[in-house]
Amino acid sequence: MSGGKTTIAPEILTTIARLTTLSVPGVSRIADDPVNVNRILKYRPYSGVQIEVRDDTVYATLNVVMFSDVNLREVSRNIQRQVSRAISEMVGMQVGQVDVHISDIDYPEVNE
């Protein structure tokens, strides 16, 4: 049998990053991308998560909303570690960078 090639669809990497981010304690949800031309012109099923692959290395940008009662820096670092680990372990690719943008904070509702 001759060698073959395995390719990973970018949507797979996006799904891994999205689900891993949502599993980190302190994350409320994935935020929508800021409005830009790319978002308007092409369909992206998971706005808020951008994945780029350059030279077999993954670069992720995540827009998140966090709960108000957490340490934002600590949760951000945990997201970076967990997403990097998940991509490395699940698909065996190098992760160059995971950028976390905190788009908003969710506060508990106050019933008056």
Image (cartoon, rainbow, N blue to C red):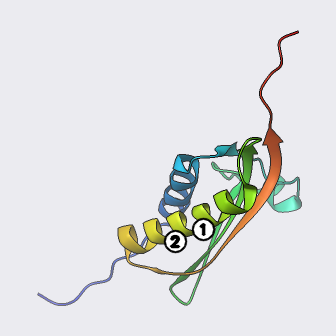
Residue 68 image position (x, y, % from top left): 77, 41
Quarter containing the C terminus: top right
Q: Secondary structure at mark 1?
A: helix
Whether residue 10 is visible = no
Question: Which residue in the structure is indicated by mark 1?
Answer: 80
Under mark 1, the amino acid is: Gln
Quarter where residue 41 is shown: bottom right
Question: Which residue in the structure is indicated by mark 2?
Answer: 84
Which residue sits at x=86%, y=54%? 34
Q: Which mark is residue 51?
A: none
Q: Would residue 86 appear left or right of 68 to someone viewing this image?
A: left
Give 88 or 81, whichever is nearer the viewer.
Answer: 81
Farthest-out residue, top: 112
Residue 90 image position (x, y, % from top left): 37, 67
Q: Would residue 62 appear left or right of 81 to someone viewing this image?
A: right
Farthest-out residue, left: 1
Which residue sits at x=55%, y=60%? 17
Q: Crowdedness of circle 1 by 10 Å Cα count: few (<14), some, many (20+)?
A: many
Total labels: the figure holds 2
Do callouts 1 and 2 mark residues in contact (Cβ within 8 Å)?
yes
Under mark 2, the amino acid is: Ser
Q: Crowdedness of circle 2 by 10 Å Cα count: few (<14), some, many (20+)?
A: many
Which residue sits at x=77%, y=61%? 101
Quarter containing the N terminus: bottom left
Give 40 or 75, whichever is nearer the viewer.
Answer: 75
Whether residue 63 is visible = yes
Above-or-below relation of 107 to 8: above
Q: Would residue 22 appear left or right of 93 to someone viewing this image?
A: right
Which residue sits at x=22%, y=89%? 3
Q: Secondary structure at mark 2?
A: helix
